[in-house]
Image (cartoon, coloured by chain):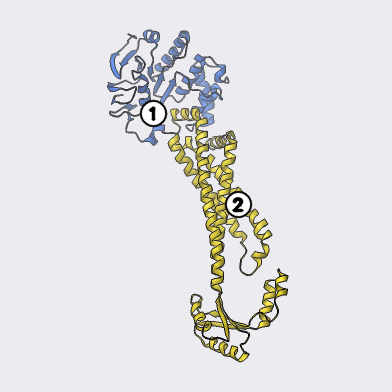
Chain colours: A yellow, B blue
């Protein structure tokens, strides 16, 4: 009977003030979607870091003038070096094929490049991924005429990670601002609900209803709205994955650098967002009531 | 029961010391602002005195932890001048509400509510809404609600204040009947006719002080 009473009070409470309820849920959903996006980006960046940093290569590009014996000599030197785990020679033709494969979505770019416009290179896997700079310093300099330049992929990737990190922080800031607005709406909704039920509350307190019994319907109203907001945010994230990540930007995410956002991470957002929304709403509701319904 | 307090706020009560025995029927009388209603608030622990102690049903109320207050209030019943009924619930539902919110089952309510409504003389009007009842009948519903938990003490703050003299007399008869079941009744009033008719203990207050405490007294 008690559970039924509390539940019907919650639904009646939300319905009585339906415009405010909608505003509260929408604001909360936007905030939670932003929070979810931020978390997904964060997970994405750390996944990508893990993935790439263990596979990082240093590329040593040769000049056009470098002769095959000179390149072979450098290769022998690389293989003998304790800093190097593995060194693989890539000819101009192989480089061109890889380029064609990588940018097959952009035929104009492929057509513009000639087969000998890409340099031959050594793809070097460092023994210690964190020590790639030593290899660059050792082979990249002082070999004018043979080595054009040596590039650490880490530098290229870190740019991308910075962009992701920036997006993640922006989403987090938006989530916090929206979240504050949502919490103010929660507090306001509960005040309105407490006011419209002030007769009931006064009598409940007079006849000795326990504090939790008086407060539960209001707190649950907030929690309910929070969970609905989390469901909407979760659906938004699913929509974003289906229509934006896997839709509009499909080619971008399928290119070499960006790993697609896995469904498991998206699904993981629901319990996280619902938990956060429910807890924070409950605390806000309870704190509001402490000031509203004094014992 | 003993109570002693000094209060600074308005309407204030200063250094009063009264004890009321179990089963007594006591009127608090006096002019507006004498601190009569404050007594009710203090007994309910809606307010606490700045100084002093209050015992109700052998429990010290002033130092009571707030989480114990709900359980304490279940041993009290309370009626007011303005009835304080829920307009969207019938007479029976208003009484049942008081049971349900303290966790009594619907089965208990179904058994007890008709009994108590019968007792207050509202048999047959269980399903009327407050606006379909007269003032006296509404106050009977309020008394039924206060009494349904069989409290040890019934507090009444001007229960006849909104009623005509004849209806007031009926309400007083009802309170007298409840008193005879062993329930202590503390009633605040300035209805002199009623006090004179009932001939019960009268405590007169003025400016926050007790100026008269008389067994079987009159309004003065």
State the residue at coordinates (29%, 28%).
B53
Q: Position of residue B190 (x, y in %)?
A: 38, 13
Q: Secondary structure at mark 2?
A: helix
Image quadrant occupied by the N terminus of chain A: top right
The CA distance from mark 1 to mark 2 is: 46 Å
Q: Residues within 10 Å of mark 1 (few under 14, many from 20)?
A: some
Do the residues bearing badges 1 and 2 touch, measured as CB atoms within 8 Å?
no
Q: Is residue A247 left or right of residue A25?
A: right
Q: Chain of mark 1?
A: B
Q: Is residue B185 left or right of residue A231?
A: left
Decide which of B141, B203 is in the foreground and name it. B203
Residue located beneath label 1 in the image: B46
Looking at the rendering, which quadrant does residue A113 occupy?
A: bottom right
Residue located beneath label 2 in the image: A234
State the residue at coordinates (56%, 46%).
A28
Q: Secondary structure at mark 1?
A: loop
Q: Residues within 10 Å of mark 2 (few under 14, many from 20)?
A: many
- In the rendered image, the vertical position of residue B204 relative to residue A29, given as above or below: above
Decide which of A124, A223 is in the foreground and name it. A124
- In the rendered image, the vertical position of residue A193 relative to residue A238, given as above or below: above
**Badge count:** 2
**Is label 1 or label 2 in front?**
2
- In the rendered image, the vertical position of residue A127 relative to residue A194, given as above or below: below
The circle drawn on residue B71 is none
- Residues at discs 1 and 2 both on one chain: no
Looking at the rendering, which quadrant does residue A244 occupy?
A: bottom right
Q: Is residue A80 left or right of residue B215?
A: right
Decide which of B1, A116 is in the foreground and name it. A116
């Amino acid at each position: 009977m008690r559970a039924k009473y509390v539940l019907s009070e919650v639904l009646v409470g939300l319905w009585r003030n339906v415009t405010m309820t909608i505003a509260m849920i929408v604001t909360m959903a936007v905030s939670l979607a932003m929070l979810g996006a931020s978390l997904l980006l964060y997970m994405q960046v750390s996944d990508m870091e893990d993935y790439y940093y263990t596979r990082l290569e240093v590329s040593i590009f040769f000049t056009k003038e470098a002769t095959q014996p000179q390149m072979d000599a450098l290769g022998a030197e690389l293989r003998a070096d304790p800093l190097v785990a593995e060194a693989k020679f890539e000819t101009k033709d192989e480089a061109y094929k890889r380029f064609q494969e990588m940018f097959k979505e952009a035929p104009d770019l492929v057509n513009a490049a000639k087969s000998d416009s890409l340099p031959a290179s050594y793809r070097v896997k460092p023994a210690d991924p964190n020590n790639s700079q030593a290899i660059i310093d050792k082979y990249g300099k002082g070999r004018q005429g043979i080595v054009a330049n040596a590039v650490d992929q880490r530098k290229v990737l870190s740019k991308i990670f910075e962009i992701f990190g920036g997006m993640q922080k922006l989403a987090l800031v938006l989530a916090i601002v929206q979240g504050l607005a949502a919490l103010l709406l929660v507090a306001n909704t509960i005040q309105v609900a407490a006011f419209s039920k002030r007769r009931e509350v006064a009598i409940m307190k007079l006849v000795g209803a326990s504090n939790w019994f008086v407060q539960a319907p209001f707190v649950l109203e907030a929690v309910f709205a929070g969970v609905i907001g989390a469901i909407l945010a979760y659906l938004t994230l699913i929509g974003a994955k289906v229509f934006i990540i896997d839709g509009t930007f499909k080619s971008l995410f399928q290119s070499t650098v960006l790993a697609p956002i896995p469904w498991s991470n998206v699904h993981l957002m629901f319990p996280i967002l619902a938990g956060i929304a429910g807890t924070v709403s409950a605390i806000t509701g309870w704190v509001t009531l402490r000031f509203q319904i004094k014992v | 029961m003993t109570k002693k307090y000094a209060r600074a706020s308005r309407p204030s009560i200063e250094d009063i010391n009264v004890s009321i025995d179990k089963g007594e029927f006591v009127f608090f009388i006096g002019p507006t602002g004498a601190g009569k209603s404050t007594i009710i608030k203090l007994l309910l622990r809606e307010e606490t005195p700045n100084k002093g102690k209050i015992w109700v049903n052998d429990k010290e109320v002033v130092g009571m932890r707030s989480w114990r207050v709900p359980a304490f209030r279940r041993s009290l019943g309370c009626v007011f001048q303005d009835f304080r009924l829920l307009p969207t619930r019938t007479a029976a539902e208003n009484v049942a509400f008081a049971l349900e919110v303290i966790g009594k089952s619907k089965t208990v309510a179904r058994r007890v509510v008709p009994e108590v409504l019968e007792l207050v003389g509202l048999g047959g009007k269980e399903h009327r809404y407050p606006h379909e009842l007269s003032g006296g009948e509404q106050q009977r519903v309020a008394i039924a609600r206060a009494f349904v938990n069989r409290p040890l003490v019934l507090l009444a703050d001007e229960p006849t204040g909104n009623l005509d003299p004849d209806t007031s007399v009926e309400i007083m008869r009802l309170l007298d009947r409840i008193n005879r079941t062993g329930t202590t009744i503390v009633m605040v009033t300035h209805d002199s006719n009623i006090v004179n008719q009932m001939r019960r203990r009268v405590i007169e207050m003025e400016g926050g002080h007790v100026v008269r405490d008389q067994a079987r007294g009159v309004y003065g």
